Image (cartoon, coloured by chain):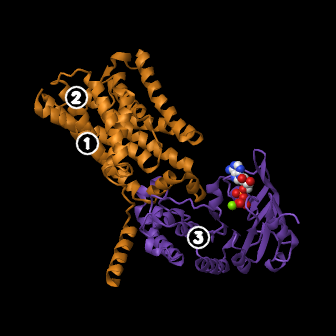
Chain colours: A orange, B purple
């Protein structure tokens, strides 16, 4: 394969997983919602995109539709989230993802079952090479990543971000301080799911096909490793985690083609992932980057004033 | 008798077979500090949590400002101006002291999803004012030096102070405080009550559980005594301290 294509391919994957990591970071890092079903919303986005693109819907509408449907499912999932204890919720969402995958796998009238369906390119450039195609995808993916990042940053550094963190820290206290935790959880899950839906659409668009095997629970765990490694409640951390884990994941994938090992290299990859997560939790439980404190204009100016006063005093 | 700001009528709350609150009726009148005392386990905290909507009462009614609030969720009760500080501080430990305060402010512009994104000017303007208010309260509680530290870095006594400070940030009509002076040095405890007394002149009513009887009796205008889930007696502090039922509650029968 063209070595430049390896690099471009890596860049696309980093972007798509960056969006997934940002969305999980919003839910888990900031609001404390342990979403172990991330792949479900990724799947909804991808299949919505694929099915709509087949009937000729323009790509941006496919993306928006995927995000919307995914958000609707996020809302649906948030309803039991209020009743269930956190650990039961985790199991419930995890199962939800698997059920969805099994449905599209066995109900072949929906989207071709095991064989999946193909997706036509978003922007057809006549006579464009494969490289140009990938470059178009990079543009699209990073545009979406940027939007998601800006939204996540604006929310994290606003009174809304303060409430998300308060709900994470102590939801009973947050409720007693006037915050409708049910509403906040529903909104955060909707927003996170919308982002995952967009990532799914981009994934379908880039690979130009969808099939059930792309949406194994391992995707969810990969995103979790990204967030835990990068540092929960830090959007830069989420992106950093996506970069590192994708490099590792794709790197070992490529190495697979050149190495002969006594065991199945895919299994080795899972073992290494497991070891990585244990190492992170043991030695760097807060992740590579620490939680970023809330920054607003007013807070920053008070902080500055105070450091000036302190400087004079000493 | 004139209607109280908070009226509790025959309220009960049991946990399995334990009648933590068993048919309590009492009134908290507007203005001043109303005290609630009683031995450990007499149901004071449970009564508070029931008033706040954290527990559903098993029987009876609770009225605030004339409205029945039994069926409201805690956040709705808070919105009416009935706020509390927990006996064991429930702070947001991974957030700064100042952010803990700012969460509690009532009527915020920016704590709604769309407003936080699209009304940035508006909430930024509002936040300036809120920060000033928060710093004033923190100064009062001698916590202003720690405004930018994480709440988790505070000592036990300071956490208690922040719990009370955070509740004050909501500018409540009625503030329930569950043992605010416990674990705080006596000088600061008295100072805190003096501040609360000042605030009570400006329209905040306080309903306070406190084991530091000497402080409470000095500042409260009315005291209720609870024992084994019931209010046994209520009156002005001078009368209560001569009331045999008060001693019986604390010292047991005989
Ligand atoms: N969540 C609960 N579950 C079971 N029993 C409880 C619970 N909360 C309080 N109790 C019991 O109710 C009684 C009253 O407790 P509490 O209201 O904390 O008393 P106080 O605040 O006056 O010391 C005690 O016997 C306590 O063990
Ligand atoms: Mg108590």
Q: Mark 1, residues whose alpha carbon is within 10 Å: few (<14), some, or many (≥20)?
A: many
Q: Quadrant of the C terminus of chain A?
A: bottom left
Quadrant location of the N terminus of chain A?
top left
**Do the numbered discs 2 and 3 sit on residues whose CB atoms are within 8 Å?**
no
Q: Label 3: which residue?
A: B168
Chain of the residue where label 3 is placed in the rendered structure:
B
Instruction: Please indicate whether residue B48 sits to the left or right of residue A170 in the image.
Output: right
Pick the front one: A238 or A154 = A238
**Which label's residue is closer to the chain start, 1 or 2?**
1
Q: Residue at x 49, y 33 (%)?
A: A93
The x, y position of residue A138, in whole percent, is 22, 39
Distance between the Cα atoms at labels 2 and 3?
57 Å
Which label was assigned to residue A2? none
Q: Is residue B75 left or right of residue B246?
A: left
Residue underneath mark 2: A253
Callout 1: SS: helix
* Whether marks 1 and 2 lie on the same chain: yes
Determine the CA span between mark 1 and mark 2. Answer: 15 Å
Dot 3 surroundings within 10 Å: few (below 14), some, or many (20 or more)? many
Residue B168 in the image: above or below residue A150: below
Chain ID at mark 2: A
- SS type, badge 3: helix
The reply to whether label 2 and label 3 mark residues of one chain is no
Query: From the viewer's perspective, is B79 left or right of B92?
Result: right
Q: Which residue is mark 1?
A: A243
Q: Is residue A133 above or below residue B199?
A: above
Q: Residue at x 18, y 32 (%)?
A: A133
From this view, report whether residue B146 is shown above or below residue B56.
Answer: below
């Amino acid at each position: 394969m063209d070595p430049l294509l390896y690099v471009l391919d890596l860049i696309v994957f980093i972007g798509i997983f960056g969006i997934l990591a940002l969305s999980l970071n919003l839910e888990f890092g900031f609001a404390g919602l342990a979403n172990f079903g991330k792949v479900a919303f990724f799947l909804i986005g991808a299949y919505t995109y694929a099915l709509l693109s087949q009937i000729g819907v323009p790509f941006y509408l496919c993306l928006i539709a995927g995000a919307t449907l995914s958000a609707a499912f996020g809302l649906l999932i948030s309803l039991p989230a209020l009743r269930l204890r956190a650990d039961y919720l985790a199991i419930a969402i995890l199962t939800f993802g698997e059920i969805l995958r099994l449905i599209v796998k066995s109900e072949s009238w929906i989207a071709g079952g095991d064989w999946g369906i193909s997706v036509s390119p978003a922007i057809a450039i006549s006579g464009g090479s494969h490289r140009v195609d990938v470059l178009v995808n990079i543009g699209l993916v990073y545009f979406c990543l940027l939007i998601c990042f800006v939204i996540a940053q604006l929310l994290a550094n606003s009174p809304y971000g303060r409430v998300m963190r308060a709900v994470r820290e102590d939801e009973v206290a947050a409720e007693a301080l006037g915050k409708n935790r049910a509403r906040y959880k529903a909104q955060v899950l909707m927003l996170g799911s919308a982002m995952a839906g967009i990532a799914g659409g981009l994934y379908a668009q880039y690979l130009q096909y969808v099939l059930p095997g792309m949406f194994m629970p391992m995707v969810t765990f990969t995103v979790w490793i990204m967030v835990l490694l990068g540092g929960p409640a830090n959007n830069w951390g989420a992106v950093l985690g996506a970069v590192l884990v994708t490099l590792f994941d794709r790197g070992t994938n490529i190495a697979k083609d050149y190495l002969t090992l006594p065991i199945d290299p895919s299994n080795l990859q899972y073992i290494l992932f497991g070891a990585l997560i244990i190492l992170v939790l043991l030695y760097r439980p807060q992740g590579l980057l620490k939680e970023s404190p809330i920054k607003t204009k007013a807070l920053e100016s008070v902080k500055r004033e105070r450091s000036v006063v302190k400087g004079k005093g000493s | 008798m004139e209607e109280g700001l908070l009226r509790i009528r025959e309220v009960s709350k049991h946990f399995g077979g334990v009648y933590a609150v068993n048919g309590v009726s009492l009134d908290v009148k507007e203005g001043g500090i109303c005290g609630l005392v009683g031995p450990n386990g007499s149901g004071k905290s449970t009564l508070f949590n029931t008033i706040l909507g954290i527990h559903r009462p098993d029987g009876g009614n609770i009225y605030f400002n004339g409205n029945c609030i039994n069926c409201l969720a805690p956040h709705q009760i808070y919105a009416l101006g009935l706020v509390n500080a927990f006996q064991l501080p429930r702070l947001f430990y991974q957030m700064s002291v100042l952010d803990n305060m700012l969460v509690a402010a009532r009527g915020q512009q920016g704590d709604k999803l769309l407003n936080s994104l699209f009304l940035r000017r508006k909430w930024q303007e509002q936040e300036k004012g809120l920060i000033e208010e928060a710093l004033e309260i923190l100064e009062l509680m001698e916590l202003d030096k720690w405004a930018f530290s994480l709440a988790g870095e505070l000592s036990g006594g300071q956490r208690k102070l922040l719990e009370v400070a955070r509740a004050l940030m909501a500018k409540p009509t009625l503030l329930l405080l569950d043992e605010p002076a416990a674990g705080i040095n006596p000088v600061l405890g008295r100072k805190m009550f003096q501040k609360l007394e000042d605030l009570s002149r400006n329209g905040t009513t306080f309903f306070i559980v406190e084991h530091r009887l000497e402080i409470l009796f000095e500042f409260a205008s009315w005291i209720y005594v609870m024992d084994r889930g019931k209010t046994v007696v209520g009156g002005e502090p001078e009368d209560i301290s001569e009331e045999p039922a008060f001693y019986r509650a604390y010292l047991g029968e005989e």
